Amino acid sequence: MTLDFRTEALLQKHLADARINVELETEGMVLNLGPQHPATHGTLRVVVKLDGERVVSADPVIGYMHRGYEKLTEYRTYPQITTLINRIDWLSSFANEVPFIHGAELLMGVEAPPRAEYIRTILTELSRIATFVLFLGEMALQVGAITPAFYGFRDREHVLNLIEAATGGRFHPNFNRIGGLKIDLPSGWIDECRRVMKKIFDSVDDFEDLVVGNEIFEVRTRGVGVIPAGVGAAYGVSGSNLRASGVDWDLRRDGPGYLVYKDLDWKVWTHADGDSFARYWVRMQETRESARMVIQMLDGLPAGPVMAKVPRIIKVPDGEVWVNTENPLGEMGYYVISKGATGPFRTKIRSASFSNVSILPWLLKGVYVPDIITILASLYFILGDIDR
Amino acid sequence: MTAVHLPLAVDAPWGLIVAIKTAVVLAIIPAGALILGYVFLLKMMSHMQSRLGPMDPGGFHGWFQLIGDGIKFIQKEDIIPAEADRRVFMAAPVVVLMSTFLLYIVVPAGPRLVVSDLDVGVFYALAVSSLSVIGVLMAGWASANKYALLGALRAAAQLIAYELPLVLAVVGVVIQAGTMNLQGIVHFQQDGSLFGWNGLGFPLILTQFLGFGIFLIAAQAELTQTPFDMPVAESELVAGYMVEYTGFRFLFFFMGEFGTAFAFAGIAATLFLGGWSIPHVHGTMADVLGPIVLFTKVMIVSFLIFWARFTYPRFREDQLQAIAWKYLIPLSLLNILATGIFKVVF
Amino acid sequence: MTDAEIPPEGETPPEAEAEIDDIPIVEPDPEPEPEPMPEAAAQLLAQLEKELKDGIIEAGHTFGDLVVRVAPEAWRKAAEVARDKLECDYLSFVSGIDWMPAPKVGGDDTEGDTSTPAQPTETTYGVAGSDGRFQVFARVSSTSRHHGVTLKVDVDEDAPTVASWVPVYPGADWHERECWEMFGIGFVGHPGMRHLYLPAEFEGHPLRKDFPLLAREVKPWPGLVDVEPMPGEEVVQEVIPE
């Protein structure tokens, strides 16, 4: 039968469509989560293959924020590197400087005075609180509740104001110096810190009622993304993620000893389940624990100088040192190889989120699409930490 | 069709009446959407989140914000993705808005203020509200975007699943009132009495509390509001099935969503709270006060809907379906059974 | 000096710039008295020696940590021993070291930029020594026993490959991918070697010392810029009379 040209064209188009439908593999839809996506905390891209709403395979693609820090450290002096490494984990930037400075001090044989060590610990715990309070709010956001995110940001502001008052920078304090700190605390800071810690306690209680007590939140997070302890450790998952799987390991207590944690009375929180709920719960308890630690340190703050005697031009003697610390995101470490110059020969930066995210291909098999978001939120990585 | 008596008792030609009614409904949809959007989405949500919301546009607490947003949307560039199915893409928001428009036809605002007093008012309202599913599916498929497709498929499953509890919850009301006509239900509540005292009338929520609860939950799901907003999961699919829509097409979806919320709240207020009626107020006074009373009750119901929206996280798709099929439907069937027994016995 | 003149911490005032090259690089003692190995590290070393026997080439310690250099054939066995016998269930990292001294920025004849720390020009190796230019090193620790060990292995410069740790520690997957793309060291037995940080078409291995830092090559670091000229003071081109 002859058709006019319009109908003919339409028929050909339909036939072409039908042919494509047969050729398509309908059982695997490839969904690209990111690099621009509200749930991936930055420029993380996860290429997931879906079968309906179930994940068949997941492949994270990282490196969109790779700044080449390990190469850059070979061209910088030690004080200049302090500025660089602030920006690895930018939510808790003070805590990034601590292991590197500690390593340089070990190599030089310099000890920071006790007051400096106390203030360093206080500021580290403050950054831990700031990071975790934000986490408490924004994991709820990823699960669907929009309100807790605002509370998280609001309460984080109090801590950031404290850090700014002491160091001059909210996000990138650049406050550590080899041998101590740049400058002493301003007057009135200690009382303000106590007030803020009280607010933090109230805020965490709010989160406990609003989020942890919510049945929908429990139903969305319990049993989702279970990381068994052995698998987690083999992948290098660290920090609250590993403690939520039941592993009682905290570098503040179990490491070779850095800062003043051994002087304080505090406990390590673990949870047996290893699911997303456990990770949320552990971080919530650790926020409270950090606030208690800060109050203890404020009570016992020694007087004295904040800077030891170091030469103006820092030359670190020959040697190698490995320093790892319990950062808010996990275990962060620096392996510094020095050959006696003003800058290191090679720095290996071991960042926590790199290993935390490496478990995703194993962890995401067989979960639903909404659970991907929950798991990403509960692992709590920062792109600067993954990509360095 | 009989000549409709306007409150001013003016006889007018049929065509003019229809034109006026159409204009009124077309004006109410954006007005309702604007009011709900401003009061609850912009102001109530902001205050619950310890922030202020818009304060500048219009001077007094930013009342002009949404109107300004509407003007902004209208003048935006009309972007249609190259791969999209153009005709379906353009038609989808219109379908959704059409179902909203059709909903307003039966909601009465006074004893004589109703666009069309259908005898099967309830049945019609629920049937017509499910037309929006087609619009959602059209939007998701025609967008040529995997995220939109995911959202549309989730929406299809969810909206169809929650139609059943919605309908079944209302059956109890119909059994008690004895009629499907919305005006009849309102009159039943207005003229009823509680243990002989008719100061409050007999709002059906008192005996149909289970039905009210189920209706609100199902309405929350029909409006794809959190905790049932899987199709529009903001942190996953960004905007779900609406993701490729910009400018005035998105405005249609937005108006459809909030207009439908207004309409559902109106239906809930009519069925369970007494609608426009205050006991002992009849005649012209009721025509004047009716819209105000209905508006107040609509705001109360909307408050509940939006309060839940801003507080709760969202359910996963399978949990959502489980709630509908395993809990809401058996409960509503139980409600019907109990209502029937009580109606016959008492 | 007034506040304005005190240079910020860490930066060198122009007068002091000339001093940096004069200050001799702190040389270690040619034959230093080796510090005794701490007790815990010695015990770990004893266990490793029992299992690996000839696999261990040299051992050292830094600030309490044990550093052991193993032979290339024993690299994977060392991982298994660490995981099973030393109970080191936790993998910190696997990475590489390039011991070649970095060539001077801009070549040997140029002034070079004054801010890059001048590294010694002879090749020296660190704790536990090295056989050649490349090494792969890894750190594993035990979450239950609270000890750890750093393992190093030499990599042949002409055929840089090493056994992969992925069958032992699955987390080594990403670390080895990064090590390969940054140093060019291949890993035998890796389930799927491809770029991690860098785009697929990237040529070269950035963390090698002979891979230049392009920013410095393009324009040498101008050094300390004390005061920038005010907007009107800078004269780029003389006014050309018409």
Image (cartoon, coloured by chain):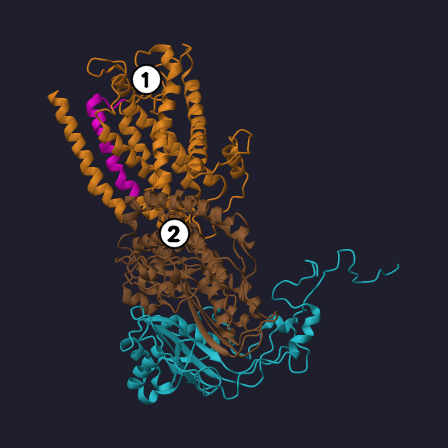
Chain colours: A brown, B orange, C cyan
Residue A155: percent from left, percent from top: 44, 46
Region rendered in magenta: B157-181
Q: Is residue A34 magenta?
A: no
Q: CA distance from mark 2 to mark 1?
A: 58 Å
Chain that bears disc 1: B
Instruction: Please give the name of the residue rendered at 35% of the width and 16% of the height, measured from the top-left corner.
Output: B112
Q: Is residue B161 magenta?
A: yes
Q: What residue did someone put label 2 on?
A: A292
Residue B86: percent from left, percent from top: 45, 46
Residue B277, numbered label: 1
Does B209 sit left or right of A96 as displayed? Answer: left
Judged from this view, the residue extending furthest toward the left is: B345
Query: In the image shown, does B74 or A114 lie closer to the viewer?
Result: A114
Residue B121: percent from left, percent from top: 29, 25
Inspect this view and state whether residue B191 appears: yes
Chain that bears disc 2: A
As shown in the figure, which amino acid type bears the numbered disc 1? Ser
Instruction: Please give the name of the residue rendered at 63% of the width and 66% of the height, measured from the top-left corner.
Output: C11
Figure quadrant of residue B293: top left
Residue C136: percent from left, percent from top: 42, 80
In the rendered image, the vertical position of residue C153 relative to residue B68, given as above or below: below
Figure quadrant of the N terminus of chain B: top left
Does C99 sit left or right of B149 as displayed? Answer: right
Q: Number of numbered discs present?
A: 2
Residue C26, numbered label: none
- The crowd level at tag 1 (other Cα within 10 Å; few <14, some 14-19, many 20+) is many
Figure quadrant of residue A365: bottom left
Inspect this view and state whether residue A2 appears: no
In the rendered image, the vertical position of residue C56 relative to residue B343, given as above or below: below
Q: Secondary structure at mark 2?
A: helix
- Which SS does the magenta portion mostly show? helix
As shown in the figure, which amino acid type bears the numbered disc 2? Arg
